[in-house]
Amino acid sequence: MPTFPPFTVFDVETTGLDPRRGHRIIEIAALRIENGTILHTQPFESYVNPERSIPLEASQVNKITDAMVRNAPTIDAVLPQFLSFAAGSILVAHNAEFDMSFLHNEKEFCWGYVELPECLCTMRLSQSMFPHEFRHNLDTLAMRLKLPLPSDRHRALPDVLLAATAFGKMLEMGKIASIEDLRKRSSFASLARK
């Protein structure tokens, strides 16, 4: 069994799809994977007050309302807490380019310099493992790997657990033997490195 560094699988829920258009994070959740074990009982989970209203279209998808985030901390408090939770690990996300684009944008709202860790992408890993398949979204990947879908999809923590389980299963199925091999198969041009 190969030895990998710790991973932090995370997901964000947002007010929209494009941080360049002012869309903001409204929820972050994460689980660490250490020595191949998902630490289910020690999650990171926080609502984030986006300091603006949540559009109806976003609320219909993630079921998060203005009332749910009204008294939540703002990103300048939540992002450092999340990064402290993830310290010493490599980030992992499904469609990591999306999640990292939001983290990259949101760090501008924090005091001082915020460094984002390396992030690997389970969608890219799926594309490398199943190159003849057309779809690689999380629902399709879960069905391909015969993983049950949570009833509360599009909420950060259930999505994280699903992505973490899929990640572990792909590591096993792909016989990925080193972090270098994993990086080749699951990295993207990380905004964290800019």
Image (cartoon, rainbow, N blue to C red):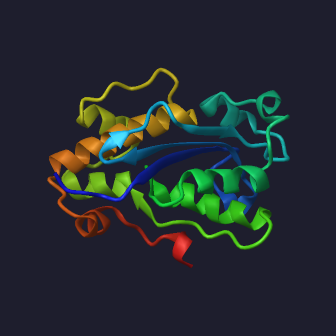
186 shown above or below 36: below
> In screen coordinates, is 26 left or right of 134?
right
Q: Is residue 190 above or below residue 123?
A: below
- How many numbered badges does the structure rendering display? 0
Horizontal side of 131 relative to 68 (left or right) equals: left
Q: Residue at x 29, y 58 (%)?
A: 4
Q: Residue 44 versus residue 150: which sits nearer the camera?
A: 44
**Residue 22 seen in the figure:** yes
Q: Position of residue 7 (x, y in %)?
A: 41, 53
Q: Position of residue 193 (x, y in %)?
A: 52, 76
Residue 136 % position (x, y): 33, 47
Query: In front: 20, or 66?
Result: 66
Q: Is residue 131 at least partly visible in the picture?
A: no
> Which image quarter: residue 149?
top left
Residue 96 x, y percent position in the rendering: 47, 57
Q: Residue at x 78, y 35 (%)?
A: 69
Where 47 falls versus 98 (above or below)? above
Quadrant for the C terminus in the image: bottom right
Residue for point 23% across, 50% down: 171
